[in-house]
């Protein structure tokens, strides 16, 4: 797997970042579900357990994406700026996913199917925003775009 990721990274750095982003997402999901399960087992109500799991999963994802996924990005912004941008992205993605879910339900899509469809699309949108905004230093071109005419 490491050889494949390395080969892809030499060909197109965004592919390596996308693979790493996906792996981080799976790990963050594990943190989310694990924290949720432990909180519920410990007696927390559903909402508290869900919020706790989502927050811990988001923190794990941010830390891993900053330190590993986008560490290769030559023009990554400082951690505090990235953290602020990440909070904005997380909030915007949550609002967008909620609106999309409501729209699908209004069209008659079953709730669980709608949730899966929406959440399957969100990582792609979030990756693009993370690569080109959250983890990029202001005023610097994204990796691999130097010299291109916009």
Image: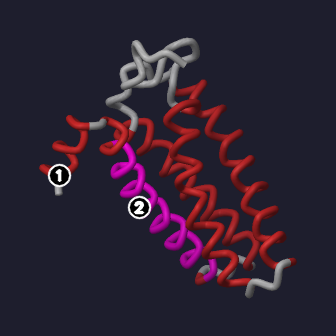
Quarter-wise, where is residue 55 in the image? Answer: bottom right
Magenta-tinted stretch: 17-40
| Quadrant assignment for the C terminus | top right
* Disc on the earlier residue, 2 or 1: 1
Which residue has dot 2 on it?
27
Q: Which type of secondary structure does the marked residue at label 2 adopt?
A: helix
Q: Which type of secondary structure does the marked residue at label 1 adopt?
A: helix
* Cβ–Cβ under 8 Å for marks 2 and 1: no
- Label 2 environment density (alpha carbons within 10 Å; few <14, some 14–19, many ≥20): some
Instruction: Indicate the colouring scheme.
Output: secondary structure
| Quadrant assignment for the N terminus | bottom left
| Residue 59 is a magenta residue | no
**Residue 106 picture location, percent across and down:** 87, 77
Which residue has dot 1 on it?
4
Give the residue at the far front of this rendering: 149
- Label 1 environment density (alpha carbons within 10 Å; few <14, some 14–19, many ≥20): few
| Residue 30 is a magenta residue | yes
**Image height of 114 relative to 9, above or below:** below
**Image height of 125 relative to 69, above or below:** below
**Image height of 133 relative to 98, above or below:** above
Residue at the spot 37% in from the left edge and 25% down from the top edge: 144
Left or right of residue 105, residue 37 in this image: left
Left or right of residue 26, residue 72 in this image: left
**Image height of 90 relative to 30, above or below:** above
Give the residue at the far right of this rendering: 106
Work out whether residue 9 or residue 29 is closer to the camera in this orientation and state it: 9
Residue at the spot 50% in from the left edge and 14% down from the top edge: 140
**Residue 95 picture location, percent across and down:** 78, 55
Residue at the spot 36% in from the left edge and 31% down from the top edge: 71
**Residue 65 picture location, percent across and down:** 43, 42
Instruction: Nearest to the eye among marks 2 and 1: give it.
Output: 1
């Amino acid at each position: 797997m490491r050889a494949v990721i390395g080969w892809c990274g030499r060909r197109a750095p965004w592919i390596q970042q996308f693979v790493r982003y996906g792996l981080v997402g799976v790990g963050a999901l594990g943190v989310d579900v694990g924290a949720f399960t432990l909180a519920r087992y410990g007696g927390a109500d559903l909402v508290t357990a869900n919020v706790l799991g989502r927050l811990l999963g988001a923190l794990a994802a941010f830390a891993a994406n900053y330190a590993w996924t986008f560490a290769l990005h030559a023009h990554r912004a400082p951690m505090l700026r990235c953290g602020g941008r990440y909070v904005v992205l997380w909030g915007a993605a949550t609002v967008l996913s909620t609106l999309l879910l409501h729209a699908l339900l209004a069209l008659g899509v079953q709730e669980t199917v709608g949730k899966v469809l929406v959440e399957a699309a969100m990582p792609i949108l979030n990756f693009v925003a993370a690569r080109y905004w959250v983890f990029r230093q202001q005023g610097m071109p994204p990796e691999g775009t130097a010299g291109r005419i916009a």
